[in-house]
Amino acid sequence: MGQLADTPPIIAAAMKKAAVVWLAPVGGRAVAAWLLWHEGSAYVVGGTGEQPLTGVEGGAPVLVTVASADKHKRLVTWVAAVAEIRPGSAEWELMVPRLATRRLSAVADAPARWARSGRVFRLTPTGELTEAGDTLPATSLAAPPVSSPATT
């Protein structure tokens, strides 16, 4: 666990207030993800019955976009090093109970289900910012929603 580089202050400040971020593999489509920010890294869980983390893989960098909680505008996009947390590891035992408390509508067996059919990732800032301040886009980057079997 831990940081690869000193976390730039803009990332640390934005992540302390973030409940949801957008994750995009480099060159890929962004997906929304709820998270836990802990000691300089974001932890996310995906898989069966959880949020889809399409394209997020251990060892491959991902872009993390953080929006303002009150104004809903982009604050920063940063590059994360991605590591998959394995069930039974010390980091799993420490972080999964914390993640479970952050999970809205969590069921009691969430950690066991995650161990069977989910994936937990640690996203650690590399120190590289791809968008911040003057480099933030001036236009909407809205995209059509991903197709889903969900109905209203």
Image (cartoon, rainbow, N blue to C red):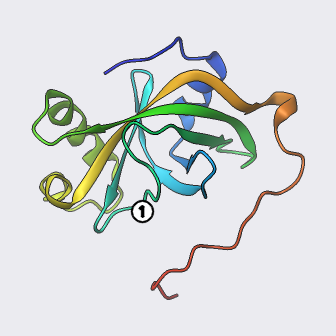
Identity of the amino acid at label 1? Answer: Pro
Depth order, front residue of 104/130: 130
Q: Is residue 141 above or below residue 151?
A: above
Q: Is residue 108 visible?
A: no
Residue 42 lies, in percent from the top left, at 43, 34
Give the quadrant of the N terminus: top left
Label 1 neighbourhood size at 10 Å, few (<14), some (14-19), many (20+)?
some
Is 28 on the left or on the right of 109, as rendered? right
Image location (x, y in percent) of residue 116: 14, 58
Residue drawn at x 43%, y 56% is 53
Q: Is residue 120 above or below residue 91?
A: below
Task: Give the vertical position of 88 relative to 34 (above or below).
Answer: above
> Which residue lies at the image location 53% right of the left edge and 22% below the top edge?
126
Q: Nearer the viewer, residue 37 or 145?
A: 145
Q: Quadrant of residue 140?
A: bottom right
Q: Which element carries disc 1, helix, strand or loop?
A: loop
> What residue is pinned by disc 1?
52
- Left or right placement of residue 148 versus residue 65 in this view: left
Disc tally is 1
Viewer-side residue, 135 vs 12: 135
